[in-house]
Amino acid sequence: MKRAGIFALLLLSGILFSSGCASADDENYLWLLAVAGGESGEGTSGEVPFEVEVGDETGSPDFLFDSTRTLDIYVNVLDPVSPVSGSQVRIYELVDGVPTQNVAFRARTGVDGIVTGSMEIDRNIASVILEVEFEGQVYSAQVDITYVQSIRRTINLLATITPIEEVDSDGDGIPDEEDDYPEDADRATVLRYPREGNYTVAFEDLYPRQGDADFNDYVLRVNYEEDLNANGDVVRIRGNYEHVARGAGYKHTLRLTLPGVTDAHLNLTRFDRTDGSIAYNFEGAIADFTGIEMMPRSDTTITGSNTGSGGTYRAGDRAQFEVVLGHPAQRAQLGALPYDLHLHVLDTGHDIHFLGRYFKADGTDQYLDSSGFPWALMVPGDWRWPYERQNIHAGYEFFDDWYQTGGLEANDWYDTFDDSLVVPTVD
């Protein structure tokens, strides 16, 4: 069945399985399965009834002032004889209740019939479509992920099915028509974060002292791409950084840690802000990807603060990189975006990290201050940070609603601002 047909069917029928079991005794289920089988046009063996065991793990997700979160995935496909290998497992985002073709995760079941993995998804995505295809038959389910920590499905086929021959040039188990890298057996799916545009990463640099909450001491725009293999594991990471503000007297370097990543290969290029020429290039092996310097001293990568009212915006340096992981890694291992991107403050010797990565002996977060506030934020889009001597609470009236409700309300807080308290839009 073609994906566009699946989406149209979901929209027109409104019959989406979200919890409980879908079985051959369900009249709506039989109708949906019949249509799916009828439209596949791929020589399936006919309607194959199945039962679905739903074991999603739920709970309130930890709120870490973050724009994205990580969900674990477990899908098991079995027929009456054996596990079903090679079933395609796909997860798509729903935006405003409408299925999109934005793939958040894709993998195929192994010889044990199982896919295990994890995906990173924006916090403002409340629902996804889980789609499992086994030889032309399709199981589709809408999953409300508001309180879901792990999507878990076991699909028991009640009959055996005949394998379908599909073109798979690189032999990785992902058909060419779905494979983003049909000639590369090591890569199958490319994911971009965010889908388009950038995130804005903003640091306060007075750690361990409480900052002034203007979040303009060191600001950069970031975006990433991940390549997944056919098992849904991350095998390559690409990223772009642009230094856009430095409202601080301290000097810093920007560093990146990828937890557990060893024997990697890094290609890092920095570009001069004046003419875009290459200012620096490194290509080589990284034995342990801990604290790797991605941008040099902040007083050399931007010439103006870009935090004063009435000032002229001055562009900063850019950097782009690609990391080829020495060993495939599940998404959860790497941590939430923007990975463990951190600021090293040269004047104090302190590192400043995002929440959820480092903890004190008593179990509290090392980078949560006494008022329950972080020193680092990642905001969707090309965010307008507060002017110097202003703060985020005044500049963004719904920011307090967002963090006081643990991200359950005002998820778009960054779209409403006091124009007189934040910097203008800059290109």
Image: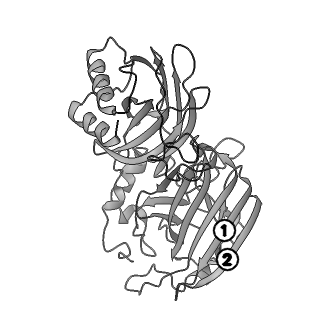
The mark nearer the N terminus, 1 or 2, is 1
- The answer to whether residue 69 is above or below residue 88 is below
Q: Nearer the viewer, residue 398 or 194?
A: 194
Across and down, in percent, residue 370 comes to: 57, 52
Look at label 1 and name its amino acid.
Asn
Look at label 2 and name its amino acid.
Asn
How many numbered marks have been drawn onto this rendered protein structure? 2
Horizontal side of 239 relative to 48 (left or right) equals: right
Residue beneath disc 1: 267
Horizontal side of 380 relative to 73 (left or right) equals: left
Residue 419 image-quadrant placement: bottom left
Please give the label number shown on residue 257: none
**Where does the N terminus fall, quadrant-wise?**
top left
Secondary element under disc 2, as helix, strand or loop, is: strand
Q: How is the image coloured?
A: one colour
- The answer to whether residue 173 is above or below residue 58 is below
**Where does the C terminus fall, quadrant-wise?**
bottom left
- The answer to whether mark 1 and mark 2 are in CB contact below 8 A is yes
